[in-house]
Amino acid sequence: MNKPLMAKATAVWLVDNTTLSFKQVADFCGMHELEVQGIADGDVAPGVKGFDPVANNQLDAGEIEKGQKDPLYKLKLKFNAAAVGEEKRRGPRYTPLSKRQDRPAAILWLVKFHPELSDGAIGKLVGTTKPTIQAIRERTHWNINNISPVDPVALGLCKQSELDTAVQAAVRRRASEGVVMSDDERRKLVSTEQSLGMSEEPKMPSGLEVFARQEKEEKPADFSDAESFFNLPQHDDDDDEDDDDPRR
C-alpha cells in the first residue's frame, strides 16, 4: 500500500494542521501538487472533513516533525499489516458521483471502437456492471437515444495505460482462442488519440474496378486529319459546277 486510506481527507488534515509543503503532502497522499494547493485555496474538496493520519495509525508524529524541519524530507507511511493487499481488492473501481453520469457514454465508446473487450474488462475500466453493458450493447438502455460515445480516458474514468493493457490482453485472449480479427478491428488497435483522429484506410481497387476505370478513360483525340475531325463530306467541285450550269 503506497498511500494512506482516504488520501484526499488526509491531505485536507495535513494542510489544515501542519506546515508541510504542498509537494510533501502530495507525495504522501499520492496526489498532484496543484491539487493540494487547490485544497489550501478552498477550490478542491471544500466539503471534505479532515482525516487524522496520526490518530488512525497511518503516520507517526515524528514524521511530521521531520517534514516540517526539512522541506525535502518525504513522509513515510506507517506499516499496517491489516492493510497489506488492500489495494488489490477485487471488484469494479469506485467512480465519483460527478462522473457516474458519463459512464454510459464511455461504455458505448468502448463497445463501438473496441468490440474485442469483454463485459468484465469494460466493467473494470469504467466501474460499471454487466447488465448495464449488455443493455448498451443490445441498445435496450432506457436512454440509448441520447447517449453519444465518448472516450473514457477523456472523461477521466480510466487511464490510457489501463485501456491499452486491457486491449492487448483481449487481443492475446482472442488469438489463443483461434479467433481471427478483421481488418477493421485491427485498425482500431491504436491509441485513443489516433483512433479518434484517423480516417478510414484506403482500400486497394479490385480487378473489375481497374478494368471499368480503364474503359472510362478516353483516348487522346487525333487532329491530324481536319476533315475527319469535322466529319466533312468529300466532293468534286468541277462536278458541282457542271451540275449547276443551266446550259447543260
Image (cartoon, rainbow, N blue to C red):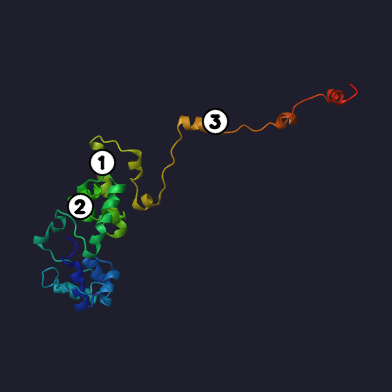
Q: Position of residue 37 (x, y in %)?
A: 28, 73
Residue 66 in sight in this render: no
The residue that label 3 is drawn on is 215
Q: Residue at x 30, y 51 (%)?
A: 109
Q: Position of residue 199 (x, y in %)?
A: 42, 47
The answer to which of marks 1 and 2 sits earlier in the sequence is 2
Query: Is 100 placed above or below 246 here?
Result: below
Q: Residues within 10 Å of mark 1 (few under 14, many from 20)?
A: few
Quadrant housing residue 31: bottom left
Left/right placement of residue 50 relative to residue 239 reads left
Q: Earlier in the sequence, mark 3 or mark 2?
A: 2
- Reading the image, the residue beneath label 1 is 172
Q: Secondary structure at mark 2?
A: helix
In what quadrant of the picture does the N terminus appear?
bottom left
**Residue 220 left/right relative to 126:** right
Q: Residue furthest right?
A: 247
Q: Which residue is mark 2?
A: 132
Residue 218 visible within the image: yes
Distance from disc 3 to disc 1, alpha carbons, whole Å, reads 46 Å
